[in-house]
Image (spheres, rainbow, N blue to C red):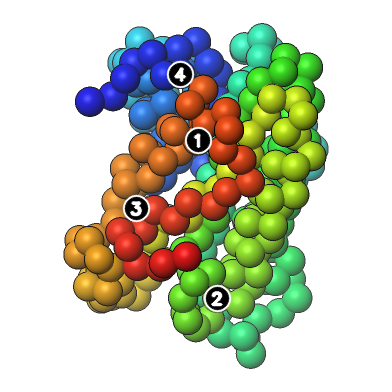
Amino acid sequence: MVNPATHKDRVAVVTGGGQGFGRAIATDLAARGADIVIIDLNAAPETVAEVEALGRRAVSLTADVSDPEAVAEAGKRALEEFDAVDILINNAGSFPFRDFFDLDFAGWKKSLAVNLDSQFLTAMTFAPGMRDRGWGRIVNIASNSLGLAVPSLSHYMAAKGGVVGFTRGLATDLAAYGITVNAVSPTASGTPGGKASFPDGVLENVASMQAIKRGGEATDIVGTVSFLSSEDCGFVTGQTIVADGGLVRL
């Protein structure tokens, strides 16, 4: 059962909150008492409606999180709606398979921009306010692919490896200000993005190799994210938790 007090009156920014992991995270945090700012390429009326049905406020902002100016503008608009942002969930990303010999520099740079640069930009936007208030939680979504031999993902794994490194470094830089920074690595899951990205049979094959032999769903990481974004996480920072049904063991 969800505890409606763990995030009471906190404000959480969730990037990529229009569907999949982001939507599940946003509604879970709302159920725990948080108001939600969704930043996505597209408007997210369904997520807003779910959050409001739980009795919390929500705003949907459209922005490309790999664009510095767009992120800065979204940050400005978020602070116009709410006085402060306490929690940042860096969920937005892309998952394109591309054979290395078909990968050009533009595709490489785009993968890093969407999956890694975006997390730097949002942290730069919202961490100063957390520092000034002496409390904050940043949770970055990484990937369990870093522990697997998956072909055609060199660009994606480079970016997600950067997420883990960024998480560790940022945790050190922000610890003195009461801000924790952690990461969560999900598995290949039956989200809209996952279903669109993976060839037929891949999700079933992944599930068969997990200790917990069922397909991953968006809701499977919300408990880990809620812990890492709560008061309970005050002495946990710089960590990457793999929430993938026991596929990768670190």
Quarter-of-image position of residue 40? top right
Q: Residue at x 54, y 52 (%)?
A: 240
Label 1: which residue? 228
Q: How many marks?
A: 4
Earlier in the chain: of badge 4 and badge 3, it is: 4
Q: Which mark is residue 142?
A: none
Earlier in the chain: of badge 4 and badge 1, it is: 4
Q: Amino acid at mark 1?
A: Leu
Q: Nearer the viewer, mark 2 or mark 1?
A: 1
Q: Residue at x 48, y 26 (%)?
A: 232
Of residues 130 and 116, the one drawn nearer to the viewer in this rendering: 130
Query: Where 33 falls versus 91 (above or below)?
Result: above
Q: CA distance from mark 4 to mark 1?
A: 11 Å
Q: Which mark is residue 7?
A: 4
* Residue furthest out toward the front: 235
Decide: few, some or many residues near mark 1? Use Cα within 10 Å; few <14, some 14-19, many ≥20: many
Q: Is residue 175 left or right of residue 85?
A: right
Q: Residue at x 40, y 68 (%)?
A: 248
Q: Is residue 48 left or right of residue 132?
A: left
Earlier in the chain: of badge 3 and badge 2, it is: 2
Q: Amino acid at mark 3?
A: Thr
Q: Residue at x 55, y 18 (%)?
A: 11
Label 3: which residue? 191
Q: Amino acid at mark 2?
A: Leu
Residues marked 4 and 3 touching at CB (< 8 Å): no
Q: CA distance from mark 4 to mark 3?
A: 25 Å
Q: Position of residue 170 (x, y in %)?
A: 74, 44
Q: CA distance from mark 1 to mark 3?
A: 22 Å
